[in-house]
């Protein structure tokens, strides 16, 4: 099994391709950001959550391939946990998470720690070009009134694995 790996900054998905599918001969894939998950200025005083959404695509150029399934997983980030993820500003932290759904009920992760992965399938053909779009939903968790002002960021690893 080979993996396509990309690094993202500040809960934003900024990608760097690295590999292709085990079911595919002479293939290359990449991840690209279409819109970032950007929360803007967060005011912790009302104790409310803040939501944002982003969008990225997985693109594979194929010389010869077969019907294949793959998963898209997101790593924990700098906080090393899915419950919750943490953005940092120096030594200060801000709790947030990334979700697979607009209702923000399924934490997008790697299938561990209560998180879920996104599965997809693609018919890979001779000289194919496959593009799949994905939305990612972010939420700064409520009741963080002690959070200090600052510019918070995190680094998220995105992994696309063909089975």
Image (cartoon, rainbow, N blue to C red):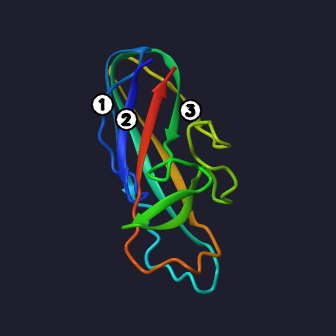
Q: Position of residue 102 (x, y in %)?
A: 63, 59
Q: Residue at coordinates 38% horizontally, 31% vertically from top-left?
A: 4
Q: Which of the 4 quarters of the picture holds residue 21? A: top left
Residue on which the image places disc 1: 18
Between discs 2 and 1, the one toward the N terminus: 2
**What's the residue at 46%, 50% (across, down)?**
77
Quadrant of the image containing the N terminus: top left
Label 3: element kind: strand
Where 102 falls versus 8 (above or below)? below
Q: Quadrant of residue 65?
A: top left
Describe the element under mark 2 as helix, strand or loop: strand
Residue count near mark 1 (Cα–Cα under 10 Å), binned few <14, some 14–19, many ≥20? some
Circles 2 and 1, Cβ within 8 Å, touching? The answer is yes
Q: Is residue 138 visible?
A: no
Determine whether, in the image, residue 30 is placed left or right of residue 92: left
Which residue is outermost to the front?
Answer: 91
Which residue appears at 47% of the width and 59% of the height?
Answer: 54
Residue at which label 2 appears: 5
Q: Which of 1 and 125 lies nearest the eye of the viewer?
A: 1
Mark 1 falls on what kind of element?
loop
Residues 106 and 154: in front is 154
Among the two numbered marks 1 and 3 on one chain, the one whose residue lies closer to the N terminus: 1
Q: CA distance from mark 2 to mark 1?
A: 6 Å
Q: Which of the labelled discs sits on residue 120, or is there none?
A: 3
Instruction: Report x, y in % for residue 109.
Output: 56, 43
Instruction: Count numbered badges in the picture.
Output: 3
Q: Position of residue 47 (x, y in %)?
A: 64, 81
Residue 80 to residue 84: above or below = above
Q: Is residue 120 above or below residue 133?
A: above
Q: Earlier in the sequence, mark 2 or mark 3?
A: 2
Residue 128 showing in the rendered view: yes
Q: Is residue 156 above or below residue 64?
A: below
């Amino acid at each position: 099994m080979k993996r396509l790996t990309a690094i993202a900054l500040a809960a934003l998905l900024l990608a760097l391709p690295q590999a292709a599918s085990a079911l595919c001969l002479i293939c290359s894939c990449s991840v690209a950001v279409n819109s970032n998950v950007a929360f803007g200025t967060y005011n912790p005083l009302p104790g409310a959550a803040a939501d944002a959404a982003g969008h990225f695509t997985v693109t594979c150029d194929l010389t010869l391939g077969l019907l294949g399934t793959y998963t898209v997983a997101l790593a924990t980030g700098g906080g090393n946990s899915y419950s919750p993820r943490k953005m940092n500003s120096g030594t200060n932290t801000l709790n947030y998470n990334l979700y697979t759904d607009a209702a923000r009920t399924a934490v997008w992760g790697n299938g561990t720690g209560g998180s879920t992965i996104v599965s997809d399938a693609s018919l890979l053909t001779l000289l194919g070009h496959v593009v799949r779009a994905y939305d990612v939903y972010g939420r700064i968790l409520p009741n963080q009134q002690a959070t200090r002002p600052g510019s918070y960021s995190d680094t998220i690893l995105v992994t696309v694995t063909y089975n």
